Amino acid sequence: MWARLLAIITKELKQLARDRMTFGMIVMIPLLQLMLFGYAINTDVRHVPAGVVDLSQSSYSRALLQALSASQVVDFTHNYSSATAAERAITNGEVKAVLYLPADFGERLVNHPAFDSRRERSALTRPVAQWLVDGSDTMVAATIRALRTMPLDELADRSVSAVVPTFEVVEYFNPEQRSVVNIVPGLLAVILTMTMIMFTSAAIVREREHGNMEFLIATPVKPLELMLGKIIPYVLVGLIQVTIILCVGHWVFAVPVRGGLDSLLLASLLFICASLTLGLVISTIAQTQLQAMQMTVFVLMPSILLSGFMFPYEAMPSAAQWIAEALPATHFMRMVRGVVLRQAEVMSLGKDALWLLGFTCIGVLIASKRFHKRLG
């Protein structure tokens, strides 16, 4: 018995040593998890892209902006002339928050108890300014809410002990801060990533393992036609999944669907095609269905962790953001949350839409070039 058992163990080890793809996954998957969780994942939100509407244009407003920038919580990247323009920028995903400084900002600041501790605190004390926040991102909204009682020591040039609200925070799209409102559209991206890549990652490998490659070689079907034929049937499957997820999310969890169905359909089609194309590229690389599944997991893991589904994109280091930008899930995550929660139009999210379209075209060409109508 021991001799037979040793023979089987030796055979499995030799087979594993010859399978370079599987051996590489044994090493790479733990390293990937360690790097993602230890380096890229950060729940402390910093450098939130923000805008400012400064109607005061005073030394006080400039000092406040410098103090907020020094905190590294927000980065003021845009200036807007009015609250309407700021709201439009939040809807389009240009910024996550906007600081609105009224024309009488200086007067409010001087009369605020947090600035002058000798003044009596009053329930009617007006906040010095107002934050307009994209409430659909619950982590970012919570970070901005933490600035409500920001001390004004630097502006007052002395220690201030009063702890009263300094800013008013207005949260758009999700004022109740229900986490499910943010999670359900994100789940749409994660589920489509998993299923769409999985469907096509084994497409070519399955033909080879089932002995159908000889029939494909004998047909006049061109590689590009084969790639398109592998993708198109699953587009309908993806749209069915989109319908199921959004309907259940709306009826069961009361998640609003504010955007137009045309924008949602276009965004979903672009992402479904990009994910199916990525699966086809994997299928032309893998030699077995096991390898295809391993590579699917290798792509799925960073898609979940780096796309902004679980952890804020803004909190990630630059290297992790570069990797995230190369993943289709990151771009669709922005689009679906913008359309479903903020009623944004696809045209206002044009950069992400063009990226997904370009990814699909390049992926189909790569898969077609890598597929050869011959055995071996």
Image (cartoon, rainbow, N blue to C red):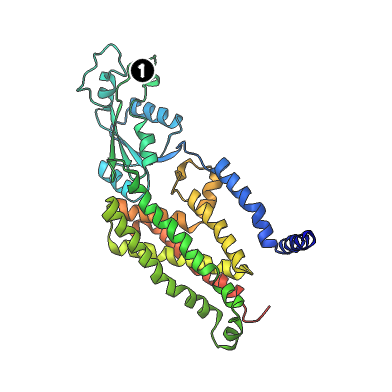
Quadrant in the rendering for residue 172: top left
User: In the displayed structure, does residue 341 sit left or right of residue 5?
Assistant: left
Residue 272 position in % (x across, y down): 43, 65
Q: Quadrant of the N terminus?
A: bottom right
Residue 259 position in % (x across, y down): 28, 57
Q: Residues within 10 Å of mark 1 (few under 14, many from 20)?
A: some
Looking at the image, which is closer to me, 45 or 188?
188
Q: Residue furthest top?
A: 118
Amino acid type assigned to the residue bearing label 1 in the image? Ala
Q: Residue furthest front?
A: 1
Looking at the image, which is closer to me, 236 or 129?
236
When the figure is inspected, residue 108 is found, relative to residue 176, above or below; the finding is above
Report how many numbered discs are placed on residues in the image.
1
User: In the displayed structure, does residue 191 sit left or right of residue 258?
Assistant: right
User: Which residue is painted at 58% across and 47% down in the image?
Assistant: 33
Q: Is disc 1 placed on a helix, strand or loop?
A: helix
Residue picked out by circle 1: 156
Residue 58 position in % (x across, y down): 32, 28
Quadrant in the rendering for residue 262: bottom left
User: Which residue is painted at 45% across and 38% down in the image?
Assistant: 47
| Residue 362 in view (yes/no) | no
